[in-house]
Image (spheres, rainbow, N blue to C red):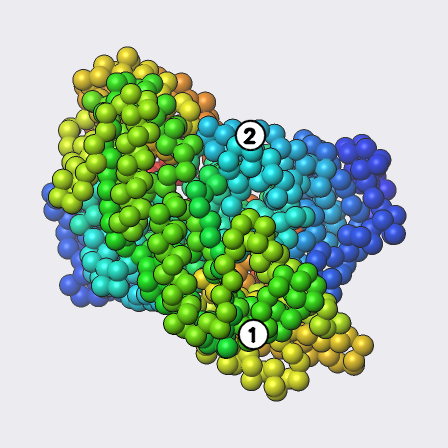
Amino acid sequence: MNATFLGELDQIVGREGVLRDPTDLLTYESDALARLRRRPGVVVLPKTAADVQAVVRHCHQNAVPFVARGHGTGLSGGALPAPDGVLIVLTRLNRILDVDIPNQRVTVEPGVVNLDVTQRVAPFGYYYAPDPSSQLVCSIGGNVAENSGGAHCLKYGFTVHHVLGLEAVLPNGEMVHLGGATLDTPGLDLLSVLVGSEGTLAVVTKVTLRLVRIPEAVRTLLAAFPSTEDAGNAVSEIIAAGIVPAAVEMMDRLTITAAEAAVHPGFPSAEAVLIVELDGAKAEVAELFGLVERICRSARATEIQIARDGEERARIWKGRKAAFAAMGRVSPNYYVQDGVIPRTKLPEVLRRIRALEVESGLRIGNVFHAGDGNLHPLVCYDERIEGQGALAERVASEILTYCIEAGGSITGEHGVGADKVQAMAHLFTADDLETMQLVRCAFDPTNICNPGKIFPTPRLCGEVPGPYRRHPIERAGLAERF
Amino acid sequence: MVDGAARSLTDLMAGAETVAGRGTARAAAAGDAIDGVLPRIVVEPPSAEAIADTLAWASRDSLSVVIRGGGTKLDWGTPPRAVDVVLSTTRMRAVLAHRHGDLTATVEAGAPLAAVNRELARHHQWLPLDPPSTDRATIGGIIATNDSGPRRHRYGAPRDLILGVGMARADGHLAKAGGIVVKNVAGYDLARLLTGSFGSLAVIVSATFKLFPLARTSRTVAIDIAGARELQSLASAFLASQLTPTALELELPPPRLLVRFESVEAAADEQAREAVSLAAAQGAKARVLQDGDETAMWDAHDRRPWEGRGAIVKVSVLVSDLGDTLTWLAEAAGIDDCEVTGRAGLGVLLIRVDGDAEAQARLLTALRQRIPVGRGSAVLLRGSRELKARVDAWGPIGDGLDLMRAVKQRFDPSGILNPGRGPGGI
């Protein structure tokens, strides 16, 4: 990169805030999707929103692309650096700026870790609801970029349901404030578009989040089933009974085995387990929990473990949340897929995945947010065997085809990033994608903000078209425009 | 600049019927007037494609278009300057799919909310929105205004429940965003962008929502309260408690708090009892309503601000600012000159301000001065032309306004959709 450009960056964030040594850059070549790697031109570590704004403005003035990155736990290559671009790492913007319990909100910088928010407000009886499995390490800024969910989003929603206000630096270096401290702010709801835009529209520098009161009662059970179909039927019965659980998670034999090997949660040996959690008012939870238990038994559950206290509940969740990482215990390499199906299509899609397992010769584990239809197939492979990596990738993308054919989506929470840009063209029409790009062009007409992500074909934005005016000869009725 | 006024009515009718189909257009009548402005024609396209074709024609001919569902909120916000075409969604009222096992439904934009919920109730589910006039207010209009009611406390507004949208763009292309599944992060969230856009970006033709099971039992605790400060203090006590009401409403005069619990019977009863004790602990008198009394009470509450003739202002403040705001309001406006209902737990109020336009304008301006940008807002929904000539309906938008204008420019470069009437006057 150009020395003058780099010198300016030194001026903005200080020399120690700029990394350009190849060994320093190595860390930042990828996010948690390690198979996509690209060396950034330079890494900057700003400490304040003003620093971020100055860096972005500098990029804009020099037509240099930039990518924002939080703690690098993304699973779709959303923070994959732009070649010859600036990687803006936001880990030093890690302050909790304001805790406002009476109004049930906090304001934080983007580098704050998800779980730190809950830990900060728990003494007051509150928590921050979105709980991605990586919540021990992932950042709020990354959650905003990906519209992260978690096991409890069936009842409590995703990041977009919990963000009230954003401060963000636009690709031209201007700072905007969208939403605010209160629920309703007049104007187009650009906040909701910015959440989940995977860092392609702006760099978020401040976030106001809603907090949720810790419920009066929480009850959790783990039920073992002789097949995933039986477990699936139990979920259908729970929904049909008019129950909205706080969470319903399903794991199959392979992922149970892996979790057991890694963190010993004491899961029974079974073809499938369901974790069902209810929360809310004590009387409601008591009555409905009994119903859930009866439903599981009549759906052929072979064993039911009921968490007696917080510790036992934590143990069950540890087994579930460790499932991805635990796959390392049963396979040298694995590919984490993230697809969504209408929940009722689960039996059909699982059958197809099983057939694919046989056909490809690769083992596929399944972790499933069963309440909301978010499927995480884990495709096992061994990269030392010639061609298996590529095969795993094909198998994983075949599963996405099943999801699309079932009426679902190519991603429920990991994002499109750099990984699934091609699949976007299967899920959406050219007109759909073009319409989304209208937003992109309004925010980032020169395409320097996390370029190459989400969309299969970049769009040149061009000038904003002015109001259409008819030509005088059209007006006179002498010609028509076709 | 739109220039449809240059066209003859016969031309307009013929043009509309060519694109939307025979028998879909008529000359506007007095009942079609929007805030006193009479449009030229009304078009009722029978399909998404016909809506798209109508928009392509309107774009080509630079005709200004106002989108109409049930017409219950057309007088909100800025009055139009001139309207060539009212595009009505009235022929698009089907529930396209109710996937009850997945707790989702896809509905055409012109379907009235109450009709949709009657259909969903067959499987004991509902789209948990309860804005005013549900018998006439359509899905499209409710999305376009992000309108909601008391149960927003538990279920959120349309922006919290929408999963996907089908739209017709100003240039006549049909597009979709989101999908039919409850969890989906593929692509930009245009469904939420259109929610609350007041018809300024595209025409919503259909939408998919997340549904909820119908609750088995409902109880409401009605609490009489001494004044605004006590109201805020009790509302805060409910928020801090572990009770899970589906609505936490205030109304005045006289000041009351209405707390609704919907669950299984045992839980609704137990929570109602706890709510009564919580009120008693603060010296307030409470009673529990159920069945017919409860329904009648909520119907009256929902109608309250809209019944009088005054201007309606929607105010959003921090819950901790509620007491001050209400006290100030009572002093500034006089308790007899305004009526308030609203979401006590969310800080969202509907205030009806009576009196003449000058007094209303003074009050709204003073109210806005009290609320710094980013800490709340006061938007004029319904108001006389005299009032709207004196004050901007939207009030300050903040530093995002240029960006909103840029989005509008990209979506509707000819400026045909609800010109000047979008949020912030976009």
Crowdedness of circle 2 by 10 Å Cα count: few (<14), some, many (20+)?
A: some
The location of residue A6, given as percent across then percent down, is 82, 41
Query: Taking A188 as reference, is B266 left or right?
Result: left
Instruction: Tell me which amino acid carries mark 1.
Output: Ala
Quickly name the residue at label 1.
Answer: A270
Q: Is residue A205 above or below residue A385?
A: above
Q: Is residue B277 visible?
A: yes
Please name whichever residue, B213 or B158, is drawn nearer the observer in this view of the structure.
B213
**Tag nearer the camera, 2 or 1:** 1
Q: Is residue A396 above or below residue A108?
A: below
Query: Taking A464 as reference, is A116 left or right?
Result: right
Disc 2 with disc 1 on a shared chain: yes
Displayed quadrant of residue A44: top right
Q: Which mark is residue A99?
A: 2
Q: Residue placed at 20% from the left, 22% from the top?
A: B254
Crowdedness of circle 1 by 10 Å Cα count: few (<14), some, many (20+)?
A: many
Q: Earlier in the sequence, mark 2 or mark 1?
A: 2
Question: What is the chain identity of the residue bearing mark 1?
Answer: A
